[in-house]
Image (spheres, grey):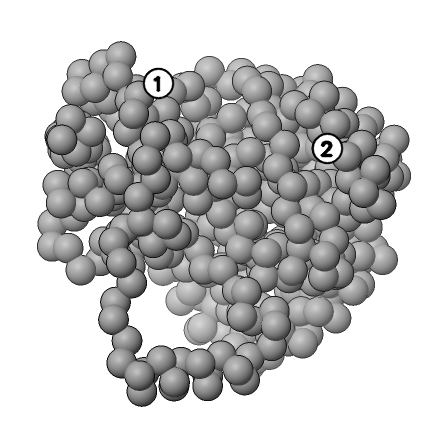
Amino acid sequence: MTHSGGNNPRGGDKPFLSAEARSAKAEGLSRLSKAARQFQESAIRRTGILGAAIPGLISFAAGYPAPEMFPWDDLQAITSDLLAKHDGNTLQYGATRGYRPLIEHLIAHGLKDRGVTARFEDIVITTGSQQGLDLAGRVLIDPGDAVIVELPTYSGAIAAFHNLQAELVGVPQDAEGIELESLERVLTGLKAKGQRAKFIYVTPNFQNPAGLLMSAPRRRALLDAARRHDLVILEDDPYGSIYFEDTTSVEDTRPIKADDTDGRVVYLGSFSKVLVPGFRVAWMVAPSAIAQKVELAKQAADLCSGVFDQRVVHGTLDRGVVQGIAPTLRAHYQHKRTVMEQALQAKLGDRIKWTTPRGGFFLWIELPPGIDDLALFDRALKEKVSFVIGSAFYVNGAGHEFARLSFSGITPEQIVEGVERLARACMAD
């Protein structure tokens, strides 16, 4: 199998630079820190940039929530009520840790309903889960530390930990989640080299990108392994509430954090997928000692998350908006999943493989034999359809036989048309 284009998703040679341009570029780099010279961009954002200039492009790349599902009328009413009070605190700077009524509501309802017990001092409101990943990394990672991730894993986490100079070590997954025998081998290998993993990053619920749901026994076994090896688990859970009708038990999506009895799980959640992403309101639940350091790191980064955004989100919780729209959201995304699966079956049949996701936003497909993700990406853009290359989610150079397709943010009609375009790209010479 030939991998075209190196690290450039478009393939081809790098553009020619004049001597003056090369000199200016070298001079700029010389001023950067060693860490900044190694910064890695988000593969998803890069895919979006490449596709933005193509009129009529259908994007399977971005995992955006469906805008038609935003609770527009409720948000307008809540916003109007907040602004009508002329309370200066509504638009003022706020506490770094977050808006207290929002945190207290999370403790009493959102987290408690998921089986997670937390105190006020354990929680920090973050500007999206991505900031949570960055802040957790800043508190836990020293340059050169090993961080264990799933194969595949979320590309935003790869970028966050890579930019903090971590050594990312991948562990394969099977149908139940991260393979524990492989994890033991990895930990043994690190120990033999005199290294110790700082933490393991997992997304147990409808993982981005593979859509996998880690089984309840595997979650418990992973927590036991973390205790034996004295590992922290960084649990990312943006999709846990977006489960479909074939996920029948609350236990299916029970957070690992719910069974954490010795303070070794850092739990991330977000309102981006179940409310709106533009508010960038998310949270971290961590042992208080870690949460305190995260608060200090956040002070250095942004002092506080958007207070007005937090108050609006709190208003939606207080009025039952999020709880009210949840069943409709699940049905909406399940329908889109089914449309995509039916279109793939009709257009590509047995040429590709996938596991039906039981929740979330993504289909993870294994490409036809002999087709490389980078080469297919080039052909797909010519057909005016995009996706995220599978290799972007691997830390070991693998994954070129996979692609991630998002069904969440586009219409069923666009899904059908996009799959037809993708099929043409797959069958092109």
Give the amino acid type for the residue marked by disc 1 in the picture. Answer: Lys
Which residue is under mark 2?
Answer: 186
Q: Secondary structure at mark 2?
A: helix
- Against 139, residue 350 (above or below) is above
Q: Quadrant of residue 299?
A: bottom right
Determine the CA span between mark 1 and mark 2: 28 Å
Give the residue displayed 59% in from the left and 28% down from the top: 172
Q: Position of residue 390 (x, y in %)?
A: 40, 37
Residue 239 visible within the image: no
Q: As rendered, which of 180 and 255 lies closer to the eye?
A: 180
Q: Is residue 379 left or right of residue 18?
A: left
Give the residue displayed 55% in from the left and 18% down from the top: 175
Q: Quadrant of residue 305?
A: bottom right
Q: Nearer the viewer, mark 1 or mark 2?
A: 2
Q: Secondary structure at mark 1?
A: strand
Q: Position of residue 342 (x, y in %)?
A: 24, 18
State the mark number for residue 353. Answer: 1
Residue 47 visible within the image: yes
Q: Position of residue 290 (x, y in %)?
A: 80, 57
Q: Residues within 10 Å of mark 2 (few under 14, many from 20)?
A: some
Give the amino acid type for the residue marked by disc 2 in the picture. Answer: Val
Q: As rendered, which of 361 and 60 lies closer to the eye?
A: 60
Q: As rendered, which of 98 and 178 lies closer to the eye?
A: 178
The disc, 1 or 2, on the residue closer to the chain's N-terminal end is 2
Q: Position of residue 165 (x, y in %)?
A: 65, 60
Number of labels in the image equals: 2
Image quadrant containing the N terminus:
top left
